[in-house]
Image (cartoon, grey):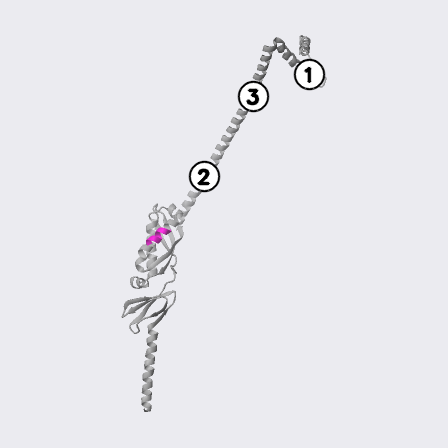
Amino acid sequence: MGFEAFIGANIVYLAIAALLIVTVFLAVRVVPQSEKFVVERFGRLQSVLGPGLNLIVPFFDSVAHKISILERQLPTSRQDAITADNVLVQVETSVFYRIIEPEKTVYRIRDVDAAIAATVAGIVRAEIGTMELDEVQSNRARLIQRIRENLENMVDDWGIEVTRAEILDVNLDEATRAAMLQQLNAERARRAQVTEAEGKKRAVELQADAELYAAKQVAEARRIQADAEAYATKVVAEAIRENGIEAAQYQVALKQVEALAKVAQGDGKQTIILPADAVAAFGDAFKLLKGR
């Protein structure tokens, strides 16, 4: 074998080896965990490669698109909307999504971010148009839920999953903000007046309750005193009935003696005036005491 033949054979072997290397290189595709590859054959969708080691037909199949399946966040967008009570508001929204079917995203929508932003703007305007301003301010959770549900239904054909939809802020124009502040101040003043009036009313009620309680206590004391006097009268009456008139005279004389004893407890400068029959009364009392 000549030198030229040897060189020619080596060139053939090198060409075959190079072809094999290129074939293996084109046939083997390693897909990262965070991506999916869209494979086309002669410009037509052939398959979608998932993470890991994959084989394709070399020279016929090609990786046309490498799509990230990580969650994405759209830039914060602002859109004007008019509430049901004709108040102009500016709503700031943020949407998070991820691609779950790359073949739909690639072949059905050109700019997915712009499409989602436009869809969100339309949904926000439509939903806020059915709500009054107070509802928008107080029911953000319900509004966010409705926006997310409508968005999921609309982007389903794009192979997208909406993971979160947030309303970051609801801004008002200066005139509306000033009117709301004035209304808020008026409401606070009204509540303060109501609280003050209720306090005065409660004070009057407590005063009336106190006076009623005092009157009841006085009446109760009088009743007890009357019962005591009635009881004493009853005792005297029973004594008169049992012992005759002498018991009554004894009680009268005893009261007179007690009264004179109290007068005599003074500082000694007072003048004691006795009735004409006082001595006789004392005598009767002493007689009755001895008789008892």
Instruction: Determine the secondary structure under disc 3.
Output: helix
Q: Position of residue 69 (x, y in %)?
A: 37, 63
Badge 1: residue crowd in 10 Å (few <14, some 14–19, many ≥20): few
Residue annotated with mark 2: 191
Q: Residues under labels 1 and 3: Cα distance? A: 28 Å
Q: Is residue 47 above or below residue 132?
A: below
Q: Position of residue 273 (x, y in %)?
A: 68, 12
1 in magenta? no
Q: Is residue 94 left or right of residue 257?
A: left
Name the image quarter holding residue 118: bottom left
Q: Main secondary structure of the magenta part?
A: helix
Residue annotated with mark 3: 224
Name the image quarter holding residue 235: top right
Specify whether residue 175 is in view: no
From the viewer's side, name the closer residue of 81 and 137.
137
Dot 2 or dot 3: first in sequence order is: 2
Instruction: Determine the secondary structure under disc 2.
Output: helix
Residue annotated with mark 1: 261
Q: Is residue 279 above or below residue 131?
A: above
Q: Is residue 37 left or right of residue 184?
A: left
147 in magenta? yes
Q: Is residue 237 left or right of residue 37?
A: right
Q: Amino acid at mark 2?
A: Arg
Q: Amino acid at mark 3?
A: Ile
Part of the protein shown in magenta: 144-150
Q: Give the number of the mark in front: 1 or 2.
A: 1
Q: Position of residue 20 (x, y in %)?
A: 33, 78
